[in-house]
Amino acid sequence: MKRVKATVLATLCLGCIGSVALAHSGVKNPAVLARMENMKSIGAGMEVLSNMVKGKVAFDAAKARAAAGDIARHSTQTVALFEAPETDPKTEAKPLIWERFDDFTTKAGATETLAIALSQSLETPDDLNAGFMQLGASCKACHRDYKD
Ligand code: HEC
């Protein structure tokens, strides 16, 4: 597989990675903050992978597997962190989540499954590129419906 182009990356999951550092200022509801922090950690793992895909950082299979493992571990917590319909003026979570919690759960599971597989099987730059694309699509599938 060819190196993934930056333009492809940009359309993949806008808002998934980077520039979220200030998103939490002023969040009052601790339950909302906890789920945001969890997503932020998922985003941080994704950024590690993204930097390798783009060639900003040298490919390192062990580091990439570890980042995928971080994403998997945090994805495992997603459903429990979102189960209660908590809200906050700063939240980007759409109320639709709690009308379609089964679907939300399925989408969280899809990201988790992909991340676990990648954390166990990633060996080559091609594995990284392919896995990154799939993972990014899984983030986007949920954000498209459930995140502002
Ligand atoms: C099952 C649904 C779902 C999946 C899958 C998902 N997200 Fe999210 N994500 C959300 C929701 C909902 C929010 C908004 C949370 C809020 O503001 O209360 C969010 C917020 C975020 C944020 C902003 C966090 C902040 O700082 O406030 C980042 C970054 C993020 N997600 C990254 C990712 C990445 C990267 C993936 C895939 C590896 C991913 N997400 C997969 C639902 C999901």
Image (cartoon, rainbow, N blue to C red):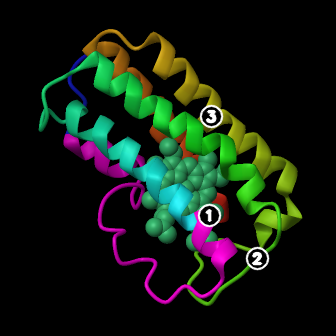
CB atoms of marks 1 and 2 within 8 Å: yes
- At horizontal 57% and vertical 44% (from top left) the residue drawn is 74
**Tag 1 secondary structure:** helix
- Residue type marked 1: Arg
Residue under circle 3? 112
The numbered disc on residue 132 is none
Residue under circle 2? 86
* The magenta segment: 6-35
Task: Look at the numbered disc 2 and say if its residue's Cβ is closer than 8 Å to ligand 1.
Answer: no
- Residue type marked 3: Glu
- Quadrant of the image occupied by residue 52: top left
Q: Nearer the viewer, mark 3 or mark 1?
A: 1
- Ligand 1 falls in quadrant: bottom right
Residue under circle 1? 35
Is 108 positioned to the left or the right of 135 in the image?
right
Residue 106 is situated, as x and y percent measured from the top left of the image, at: 77, 41
Do we see residue 128 in this rendering? yes
**Tag 2 secondary structure:** loop
